[in-house]
Image: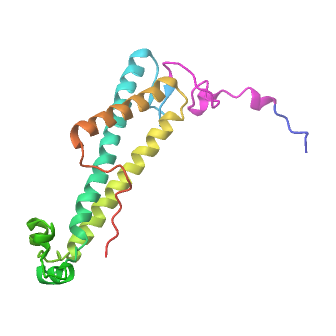
């Protein structure tokens, strides 16, 4: 079983397989790299700078897209789940004290009473399907872009790694500038009734 000849395996040239010369799971600094596909290669510093900028922009846009997806899910979630509220009479009866004082006299704002009269919003099947389709599409696009960025990092080229990280940081700053206070960084998942 140990009689296999491994001499030819040691002399294999990784460039014939479309890989970078230093593709041994060790980070390297070079202007020559194969990005994701055969033919998508950088051969000199000018091409590496261009790839750096493009990947940085993709990474920043990914961060914005991810935040937009969370924002969309949260805003639509509020519209999709009916909020059942009691009427003013029921609320007054439930919260009045022994003297018969109603909520405004007990510190409840008039806005809270007016809001309690809102009817539950009816959600049509079309709206649910549209919500599910859009959130699924956004999720799929985010997933594809995130895996592509991961594969770029896995080229183990330091310049490409830095472009992904720097782009993500720029995207994070842009989300604070664009969506300040509007997006919870949590899951943002909506459980439809």
Q: Residue at x 48, y 18 (%)?
A: 31
Residue nearest the observer in this picture, 75 or 165: 75
Residue that lies at the very extreme toward the front in this rendered image: 99
Residue that lies at the very extreme toward the top in this rendered image: 45
Residue nearest the observer in this picture, 103 or 156: 103
**Quarter in which the C terminus is drawn:** bottom left
Residue nearest the observer in this picture, 179 or 86: 86
- Give the dominant element type of the magenta stretch: helix, strand or loop: loop
Q: Residue 120 placed where, x, y %?
A: 17, 77
Q: Is residue 16 rendered magenta in the image? A: yes
- Left or right, residue 172 beside residue 18: left
- Residue span colored magenta: 7-32
Q: Residue at x 22, y 40 (%)?
A: 178
Please tell me whether residue 59 is drawn above or below residue 88 in the rendered image.
above
- Left or right, residue 137 beside residue 45: left
Q: Residue 4 placed where, x, y %?
A: 86, 39
Residue nearest the observer in this picture, 1 or 56: 56
């Amino acid at each position: 079983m140990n009689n296999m000849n491994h001499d030819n395996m040691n002399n294999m040239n990784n460039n014939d397989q479309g890989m970078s010369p230093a593709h041994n799971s060790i980070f390297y600094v070079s202007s020559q790299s194969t990005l994701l596909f055969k033919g998508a290669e950088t051969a000199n510093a000018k091409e590496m700078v261009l790839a750096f900028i493009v990947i940085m922009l993709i990474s920043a846009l990914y961060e914005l897209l991810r935040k937009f997806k969370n924002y969309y899910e949260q805003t639509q979630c509020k519209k999709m789940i009916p909020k059942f509220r009691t009427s003013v009479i029921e609320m007054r009866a439930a919260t009045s004290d022994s003297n018969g004082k109603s909520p405004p006299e007990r510190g409840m704002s008039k806005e809270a009473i007016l809001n309690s009269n809102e009817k539950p919003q009816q959600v049509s099947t079309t709206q649910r399907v549209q919500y599910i389709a859009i959130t699924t599409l956004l999720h799929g696009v985010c997933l594809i872009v995130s895996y592509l960025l991961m594969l770029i990092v896995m080229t183990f080229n330091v310049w490409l790694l830095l472009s992904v990280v720097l782009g993500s940081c720029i995207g994070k700053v842009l989300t604070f500038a664009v969506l300040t206070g509007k997006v919870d960084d949590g899951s943002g998942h909506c459980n439809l009734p």
